[in-house]
Image (spheres, rainbow, N blue to C red):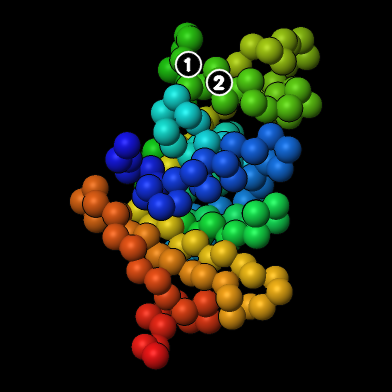
């Protein structure tokens, strides 16, 4: 099945890495602030099978939310120590916030947050009485549509046996290019 989330050659690896309950995908995520400076932080990524997307939660008053509302271009990097694969990506981000009432995306993502973090959302609103199972109105969800995947498979026994491949999505069509582990350019022909 063709999809724009990830190209078929790496789709299974991406889905497994970003939906692994035993090894959650806490990864570095980059935005650009109003002054043009890179801003990096760690977020907990989730693969959402019902939408076939990568997403994470964010407070609607957080700097990352403001950055992405102003400039939806983002990047991320996750090293999966279980599979020895580095997943780097560039993406377009879309921010979803509480419009009031039931929202399946926001409700689903709220349920993925640990109870202590949900309590922190409520306490941030100066609520002394709250139900952590009820979604807080300051929850936002950032959904990512990758335009580039840079996949580096590590060979621990011999670095030279590793592999790095770039996958670019141009107008809904993924291309694949094997590149050097060292510098990201095409490897020399032998």
User: Which residue is at the front of the view, 146 or 69?
Assistant: 146
Left or right: where 71 falls relative to 117: left
User: Which residue is at the front of the view, 46 or 131?
Assistant: 46
Q: Position of residue 129 (x, y in %)?
A: 76, 10
User: Which residue is at the front of the view, 102 or 50?
Assistant: 50
**Residue 7 visible, this orientation:** yes
**Residue 34 visible, this orientation:** no
Q: Examine the image and state in which quarter residue 85 appears.
A: bottom right
**Disc ID at residue 108:** 2
Q: Residues within 10 Å of mark 1 (few under 14, many from 20)?
A: few
Residue drawn at point x = 72 percent, y = 15 percent: 132
Look at the numbered disc 1 and give the secondary structure of its residue: helix
Q: Residues within 10 Å of mark 2 (few under 14, many from 20)?
A: few
Q: Position of residue 79 (x, y in %)?
A: 63, 58
Left or right: where 155 falls relative to 89: right
Which residue, given by chain and number where applicable, does mark 1 sit on?
A: 104
């Amino acid at each position: 099945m063709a999809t724009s989330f990830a190209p078929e050659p790496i789709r299974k690896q991406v889905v497994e890495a970003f939906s692994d309950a035993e090894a959650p995908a806490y990864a570095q995520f980059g935005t650009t602030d109003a002054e043009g400076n890179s801003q990096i932080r760690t977020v907990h990524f989730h693969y959402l099978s019902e939408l076939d997307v990568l997403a994470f939660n964010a407070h609607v008053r957080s700097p990352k939310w403001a950055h992405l509302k102003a400039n939806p271009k983002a990047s991320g990097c996750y090293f999966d120590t279980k599979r020895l694969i580095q997943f780097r990506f560039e993406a377009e981000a879309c921010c979803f916030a509480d419009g009031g009432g039931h929202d399946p995306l926001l409700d689903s993502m709220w349920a993925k947050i640990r109870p202590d973090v949900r309590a922190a959302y409520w306490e941030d609103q100066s609520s002394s009485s709250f139900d952590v199972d009820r979604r807080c109105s300051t929850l936002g969800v950032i959904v990512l549509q990758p335009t580039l995947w840079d996949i580096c498979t590590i060979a621990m026994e011999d670095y030279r046996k590793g592999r790095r491949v770039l996958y670019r999505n141009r107008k809904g069509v993924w291309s694949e290019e094997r590149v050097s582990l060292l510098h990201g350019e095409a490897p020399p022909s032998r």
